[in-house]
Amino acid sequence: MKLISAWFSFSAAFLTLTAFASDYPVTPVPFTAVRVTGGFWQPRQEINRTVTVPFALRQLEDSKRLKNFDLAAETMRRRAAGEPTFQNMPVTIFPFDDSDVYKVIEGASYSLSTHADPALEKQLDEMIVRVAAAQEPDGYLYTFRTMHPDSPAHEWMDQKRWLKDPELSHELYNLGHLYEAGVAHFQATGKRNLLEICTRSAELLWQTFGSGEFKIAPGHEVVEMGLAKLYRVTGDERYLKLARIFLEARGPGGPDYNQRHLRVVDQTTAVGHAVRANYLYAGMADVAALTGDAHYVAAISKIWENMAGRKLYLTGSVGARADGEAYGADYELPADGYNETCAAIALMMWNQRMFLLTGDARYVDVLERSCFNGVISGVSLSGDHFFYTNPCVYDGSKKNNSGFAGRVPWFGCACCPPNEMRTLAALTGYFYAIKDDALYVNFYAQSEGEVTLAGTSVKIAQTTEYPWSGKIKIAVTPATPKHFSVRLRIPSWAQGRPLATDLYGYDDPSPTAWSVKVAGAAVPAELDRGYVTITREWRAGDTVELNLPMPVRTVHGNAQIAATRDRIAFERGPMVYCVEAVKREFVPENLSVAAQARVTAEFRPELLGGVTVLSIDGGPERGLITAIPYYSWNNRGLAPMAVWLKRPVVSVSTSGR
């Protein structure tokens, strides 16, 4: 495994870096420094590497997304050779199809960072040659325009560059994913071939927008995050200034669909297209961290409170409305809500950044909820079929998955599959973080890692069956005895509440009897922003034992959520459960289950790759009802499914006056 810094791997040999005056107060431990060694995540990461990555690379060819780059290059070549009217029409549907190529390169590069693969590296190099050939001499890269320059090849485009980007052209959106891919590929391989494409493009952006005279608010945000990554790797402050220029170009008076209704510092609620919104808030966090802008932090903190307190699904998904793939009104959380996979992934990105800004575990609690439920539900256990939407109820036949019923291999709008790929490949980057001489342990998984604390190398090894069991052993092995702190996250579900807000609650809100021991001695159960802090001189052989009991919880929604009134859902640990009628012998959403019903949990290694199921007493009419983890539904064919079940209305007779 290559231990590559998230910010500057290989760059000393190729670039001159600056010391950043400001960045996140908490520093994430790079995913390349942590390796999953078993348990829940190992098969998922291995399937992602061996199935999803090659599958996605084939889809780029089969869906002709790479062909667009070839056609753009052909148009430039033949015009330069004396055919002034030659042009090609795109062979795919959307102007943002370029971005799928970039996201696949990014995910494949993450895979290369942890698993050397000369054949994959060669394949990426060949793809990058095709991308480079489609870049115009001044750095412009957007295949739909370059291949057909005399008139717009799509109604979303203007005859002139950039003018329709605030609407739907996606010119800047594509570049944001290009920059993220360029940084990932450079860090994985040390090669500048894709990174130089990025810097030529970014130079054009600076020449076009750097003066501030020509203002464009990106219609689909992500370029802000891409520019922040490019700044970190190159030290070129112009990229950070560009990210801020694009943020400051928003509002007032535009549509809330793409968050142009107000200036970013004046926004207080999560609105509009959910993926766009979450990418915007993550980009704001990046710029806030790198510039120290407290106004940005204040704005995204208010927006987070609105999202987590009024617009978040129990499964960690967001974006209730199919119309506009958008956040709904406060408490608008219908069971059949849209819940795009990309929106949940973007929510993870935003919450990770909120944690890095504050060191508060409540953001990681939302991140974990999204990851174990609304994110991994987006990819099949086989790694080659996907959900675009992730509802909490399904009738067993509706074509709600981007026009399909059930999981499918690919989409015309294929943003979600490569997003899953890059997220799973770099998932271990969410596990740990460092601030001063303190190590934050955020994610529990069978794994090994190495960090530097108090000036010494420290190996961290977790042994656990989490999320099926809350028993976790963490071996802390410093190279030499050192005094530092280990901060263990105690999840909100262990504290007796699903979230830090009142959007959902447990019928029994009692905290679990969680405990922490070091070398057999109990650690006081004192929490600071969701963490137990253990400060001591650590020596080789020291082991932390964390026990997080996992009772089955019945969950109710806030009274203002119409869809969850008189209904309950079930959770165990970080997992949300659903009932799936594989044989269609009943309609899950019509089931009536008492909150006091007897429920038992049992691990079944032969079912759905190995899952803990819940057996719920459905009474004399129904008998035992089996609930499975939400992420695993629709892996046994089309079937009705529901997360929220009916709670029987109890009639209470009274007597007296």
Image (spheres, helix red, strand yellow):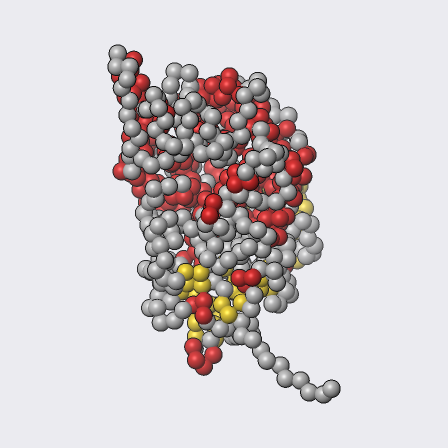
Q: Is residue 306 left or right of residue 42?
A: right
Q: Give the vertical position of 247 relative to 385 (above or below).
A: above
Q: Residue furthest top?
A: 82
Residue 409: % across, % down: 32, 47
Is residue 459 in sight in this rendering?
A: no
Residue 474: % across, % down: 55, 50
Quadrant of the rendering where the N terminus is positioned = top left
Quadrant of the rendering where the C terminus is positioned = bottom right
Q: Give the vertical position of 361 relative to 204 (above or below).
A: below
The residue closer to the viewer here, 232 or 547, is: 232
Question: Could you say which quadrant of the image residue 246 lies in?
Answer: top right
The residue closer to the viewer here, 404 or 548, is: 404
Q: How many labels were placed on the picture?
A: 0
Residue 475: % across, % down: 55, 49
Residue 231: % across, % down: 54, 25
Question: Could you say which quadrant of the image residue 127 lies in?
Answer: top left
The residue closer to the viewer here, 151 or 264, is: 151
Residue drawn at the location 46% of the way across and 71% of the way down: 591
Residue drawn at the location 58% of the way across and 37% of the way down: 261
Question: Could you say which quadrant of the image residue 452 lies in?
Answer: top right
Residue drawn at the location 64% of the way across and 57% of the way down: 502
Residue drawn at the location 48% of the way across and 18% of the way down: 203
Q: Is residue 571 left or right of residue 152?
A: right
Is residue 528 in sight in this rendering?
A: yes
The residue closer to the viewer here, 449 or 311, is: 311
Q: Residue furthest right?
A: 657
